[in-house]
Amino acid sequence: MSDTRSASYVMSVSIIGILFFIFGFVTWLNGTLIPFLKLACDLHSDAQALLVTFAFYMAYFFLAIPSSMILEKTGFKNGMSLGLFVMAIGALVFIPAATGRSFPLFLSGLFIQGMGLSLLQTASNPYISVIGPIESAASRISIMGICNKVAGAISPLILGAIVLEGATEIEQKISSTTDLAQRSGLLQDLSHRVILPYGIMAAVLVLLAVMIRYSSLPEIETGDEGDQTDRGKTSILQFPHLLLGAICIFIYVGAEVMAGDVITLYGKSIGISLDDAKNFTSYTLRSMVIGYIIGIFAIPKYLSQARALTWSAITGLLLATLAFVSEGYTSIVFIALLGFANALMWPAIFPLAIEGLGKFTKIGSAILIMGIAGGAIVPQIYARLSETLGPPAAFYIIMVPTYLYILYYALKGHLVGRRA
């Protein structure tokens, strides 16, 4: 590779790394928003609070295919810029939502942010996968994952320090106040805490959108990428390894959200104070960063993408079981360590699923991005099950089948339709 091409490659990877940092920062704010909005909007159940993840992640389901169509018109770079603008709009919606203490408006802002992220993810994931050799795609995505999860580890600490400062004391004041006007004032003051951080976020997103639009990020063509197994294929439905991969993404993202976002509510449900539980998401993401670092050095030199996925699924099964048979903070530790098990799953599943799609890469990527809706559905299933079975049993019943399917995809599923 010439010096010019090498410099261009490094610049492109760096720009995409910045975008993945933004993905992580915005996405993992949900772990803090869930308990915050439950308190500020006076919600009465975990199922209501988990509509935060439902609104955010369902946007991927509805917008992934349209995002693919938009990218066909705009190209990758302009599509990424547009996605950042849409995210900025979603952040601005938080201002009237906080002023009116309107939970539906908060959910609307989250859905709009999910729309922008859907466009960004549909563009950036195949971009980073095909910008270099497909065999090392998981290593590149692991680098992106570090950018994503470092941001994710930071963002709940920052937002938590702003909006949930003295959370236990505030919670006690609200629950003990009998004067309706005073109670409403406390809730209003709490709600207003999100205005400044989300206003700043909107400004930063607009600035980044302009920078990406006028950056040197090169356009790429995916029509001839892959191993040309797309020859003779007329429909994306003729790639069963992709469709099985979309299911894998769906349940994997559900597992990731369970370990990263639901962990706060889980901690509260077993008697841990909100002042402590508000930081649990950050612990999960720190363990994910460790997993990504291992992925950078191990894939593909020591581990193939499929083998890395295999060991990740086995580790997930073990940790989920240990979380179930443990209690208190020990259980929380094992749930947080699921971040380590989950770290290499997206970097492995995505390239395995789009390998060989050729001219179908963009639409294939969109279908995989639709699978992110697992982050909307799985926590809702957990909320319903936990009401009758209790949080530990509900968590275990969801996570074990999830990791078993991921293990199947690692061993057999990614080969379906690709070998005689």
Image (cartoon, grey):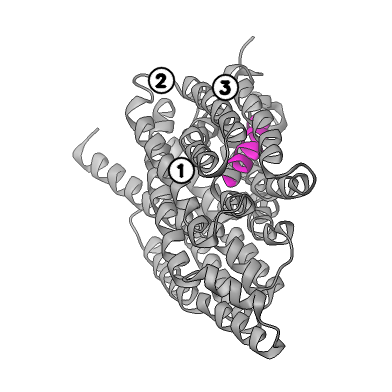
Q: Which residue is mark 3?
A: 410
Q: Residues within 10 Å of mark 1 (few under 14, many from 20)?
A: many
Q: Is residue 266 magenta?
A: no
In the image, residue 276 above or below residue 243: below
Kindly check if marks 2 and 3 are in contact, taking CB atoms under 8 A apart as contact: no
Q: Amino acid at mark 2?
A: Leu
Q: Residue furthest left?
A: 3
Q: Amino acid at mark 1?
A: Tyr
Q: Earlier in the sequence, mark 1 or mark 3?
A: 1
Q: Quadrant of the N terminus?
A: top left
Distance from the alpha carbon under mark 1 to that under mark 2: 23 Å
- Residue 42 visible to an observer of this rendering: yes
Provide residue 353's location: percent of width, then percent of height.
58, 30
Q: Using the image, tell me which numbered label, if any, was put on residue 127.
A: 1
Can you tell which quarter of the image residue 304 is in? Answer: top left
- Residue 221 visible to an observer of this rendering: no
Q: Residue at image x 77%, y 41%?
A: 389
Q: Which residue is mark 2?
A: 303
Q: In front of the other: label 1 or label 3?
A: 3
Q: Earlier in the sequence, mark 1 or mark 2?
A: 1
Q: In front of the other: label 1 or label 2?
A: 2
Q: Is residue 247 magenta?
A: yes
**Residue placed most toward the observer, 357 or 382:** 382
Q: What kind of element bears circle 2? A: loop
